[in-house]
Structures are given as C-alpha cells and as structure tokens.
Image (tube, rainbow, N blue to C red):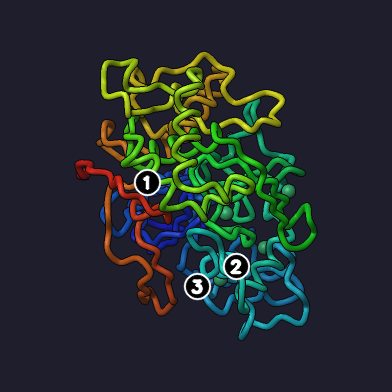
Amino acid sequence: MGGVSEGDDVLARWSDGLLYLGNVKRVDGVKQCCLVRFEDNSEFWVLRKDIHSFSVGVEEVCCICDAPPLKEPLINCLKCRHCYHPECHTPSIEPEADSNSWICRQCVFAVATKRGGAIKRGRFARLMQIMKLRLPYQLSSLDWDPQHLTNQQQCYCYCAGPGEWNLKMLQCGSCGQWFHEACTQCLTKPLLYGDRFYEFQCSVCANGPETIQRLPMSWVDLAHLVLYHLSLCCKRKYFDFDHEIMSFANENWDSLLLGSLSDTPRQDRCHNLLNALNSNKDRFVSGKEIKKKKCLFGLQVRAPPPLTSDSSPLITDPPINITQRRRSEGEQWGQSHANQSGASWRHRSVLLSRSRHQVRDQPSATPSLHSKELPGIGMTCQSQSVSVWRKGSPYSQCCLFTCSSKPSLPLIHY
Ligand SMILES: [Zn+2]
Ligand SMILES: [Zn+2]
Ligand SMILES: [Zn+2]
Ligand SMILES: [Zn+2]
C-alpha cells in the first residue's frame, strides 16, 4: 500500500473528525486498511483513506497519486513535508504558492479541528474556510442507505473521514452530506448526541461560511434529546428525573439553545418535562411500568428524536427493545437501528464498521465512548522532526456538557 508501512507513526482520523496519533502494526493491502495502535495501546483497523503518514519517500512523488513531478516541480507542505502536484490537492494549489510557506489540507485540518467546533479565528481558521469550499471526493459517487444516514465508503464531511450521523454531526439541508462538529465553524454551543434540531448548510453549498439556524423544539423533543444524550453518555437506559434528567437540563440550560422555551423558570421546566415524559408513552418508559421507581425514565427506542418536519420519521422500523439488544460489534446504537432497512446494505455496513472498529482477538471487547479516561490530551510531541498534534486517543473523547451522572463503568482492558 502506497506510503504506509508497518512501524510508521501516523495520524488516524476517527469518526469524530479528529486526528489521533498512532503507530501502524499491520497493513492490509487488499482491504486497504491498517491496524493502528493508539497511545493507550488500543488497536483498531483504520481505512487507508483515513491515515495520514509522515514518512516521506526517498523519491519525490505526489502523496495523492504516487506519480513523480510532471512539468512543474511538486509543492511541499511546510508542516508534513508531503509533496503534491498542484492539481492533485483540493483545492488546487495556486501557482504563487511555495514550499516554504504552503500548508496542505490535512495539516490545516489537523490544527483547526476541535471538539465543540473548529477554530474560528486566525490564519488556520481562514485557511480551513478556503479548503472547505471544495470536497476532496465526489459526493455523487457515495452509496447511501435508504435513509441517507450512512454510506458504504465511510466518507463524510469536508475531511472525508468516517463518521456516525447520530454522534455529533450536522446534515447539510442542501446536499444531504453529514459534517463533524469538530470540522464546522458555525456552532455557538457544542452538539448533543442525536441533536438534529438545526438547519445547516455546508460551506460547499453556501459557497462561503456555513449557515446555521436552531430549529424550534418542544418539551417532548427536549425530554427525548436529553434522554438520548444521557443514554449514550452514561450507557444506561433509565435515569432519575430530579437527579439526572432535570439536573442535566438545568446545568446546561443555556447550551441547549431552546429558543422560546429558554425563558421558562426552573419550577415550570420541571413540570413541563415531567408532563412530556408521562404523556408520550410511545416514546418514553417510566420506571413504574417495569416495577421500578416511578421517578425513573428511559426511551422506548434508543434513537434520536425525529424532526417534526421529517416526511419519514426515523422511528419507522420495528422498534428494537433496548433491554433485549446489547450493543455489539462496533455498531452504534442509532446506526444499528437505522441499518434495519435493507439486509444486504446492513451486512455490508456492519462488515465495514467491523473492519474499522473491532479489536484484534477481542471480539467481545467493544470500544465505546467514555470507556477510558486518558492523559495526554492537547500535548504535542515530535515525530521524525515533524510537529504532531496529539489529541489523545479515540477513547478520550468526551462530551463538553456538564453531567452530574458520571458513568461508573468498568474499564475495558486490551
Ligand atoms: Zn470532518
Ligand atoms: Zn499527484
Ligand atoms: Zn501537510
Ligand atoms: Zn452541502
């Protein structure tokens, strides 16, 4: 496989759009993927397209097409020293660019992407905005599932990285593509898991800065969203109304951007949310119904709240009872639900997600968000005299919301 060998230090793009430092343990040229060991010693198969290597060959060849220079010399990136034909880079490199100052798309994204939203000011923010006017792939060549939530190529966003539509991504209302929170520059607050209450237009479609608008939400939407977010964060089904649901809503009230609901005094919030939970049996289960405390609530189906404007709401498939279904084999909850339609599609999708997620020789150890807390986030290190932006490991990703119901989960050991 061109450019990547065993033992190489690489940056691997994760489904959150961020790059993580790792070391290549194995290369599978047939499936076009590499087994990468991250800094916490976890190992994952990562598709070749999501790996950015630092190794620069003896011969100068373009890192996109592997060909030597044509008429003009190749341009080197100042940061990673990779060489590009001007036409192979997206967008194509301007004739006046020179190798002492030009920075490639990968390196711009490595610096500018952040949890909660990419940087908005400074040179790298401006460079990123320019890069985002074009996608480095053909949007029309992607094969989508019927609901347009996942594609077989695992290619999303401006960064062409993998993604999980229900895990902090925004869908462009014009082109339908999904974009990572970390790659967007329009958010004023971080995204909740499964929050689709935005009208968003990507930079490609807007031909300039992204546009975004918060959509109105009802109390039922809010109750559903908070429960969905908490269920992904804490990996539980039931939450205590006062101590978890209400306290999460109150602690993050301003970040939830609730529009006309945002002026509601505290005592009324409580009443409205409780009423929403008790009067929508199709969406919520209370503890009373399962012979537990009546102050507990959970989702009937672990899926993000549907948009009221959806012509075909998400919850159209036969409901999957959460208690009967264990999260397994790298499937994300919402994704497994969404993949129900179309058996052949589902098979392919699960295969792909296995190749990316599953840990070698550890079929039962399913990596999941928040399963490990790791040191080292935000540190930098030197690798082959190239600056590396170390962003922790995929496991260190954390939600930026205040949550008093911290997960108390056993660590997964590898
Ligand atoms: Zn991205
Ligand atoms: Zn080239
Ligand atoms: Zn570069
Ligand atoms: Zn778009």
Left or right of residue 408: residue 87? right
Quote the CA–CA distance across marks 1 and 2: 56 Å
Q: Are marks 2 and 3 in contact (CB under 8 Å)?
A: no
Q: Residue at x 21, y 45 (%)?
A: 411
Local packing at callout 1 (Cα closer than 10 Å; few below 14, some 14-19, many 20+) is some
Asked if ligand 2 lies within 8 A of label 2, the reply is yes
Quote the CA–CA distance across marks 1 and 3: 58 Å
Per the image, the residue denoted by label 1 is 247
- For this orientation, the residue located farthest to the bottom is 100
The residue nearer to you, when weighing 116 against 81, is 116
Task: Relative to 374, say whether 222 is above or below.
Answer: above
Q: Residue at x 52, y 38 (%)?
A: 222
Q: Residue at x 36, y 35 (%)?
A: 241
Quote the CA–CA distance across marks 2 and 3: 9 Å
The residue nearer to you, when weighing 224 against 235, is 224
Q: Earlier in the sequence, mark 1 or mark 2?
A: 2
> Residue 61, which numbered label?
2
> Residue 278, located in which quarter of the rendered image?
top left
Q: Position of residue 65 (x, y in %)?
A: 64, 58
Element assignment for label 1? helix
> Residue 58, which numbered label?
3
Q: Position of residue 245 (x, y in %)?
A: 39, 39
Task: Relative to 330, say whether 214 is above or below.
Answer: below
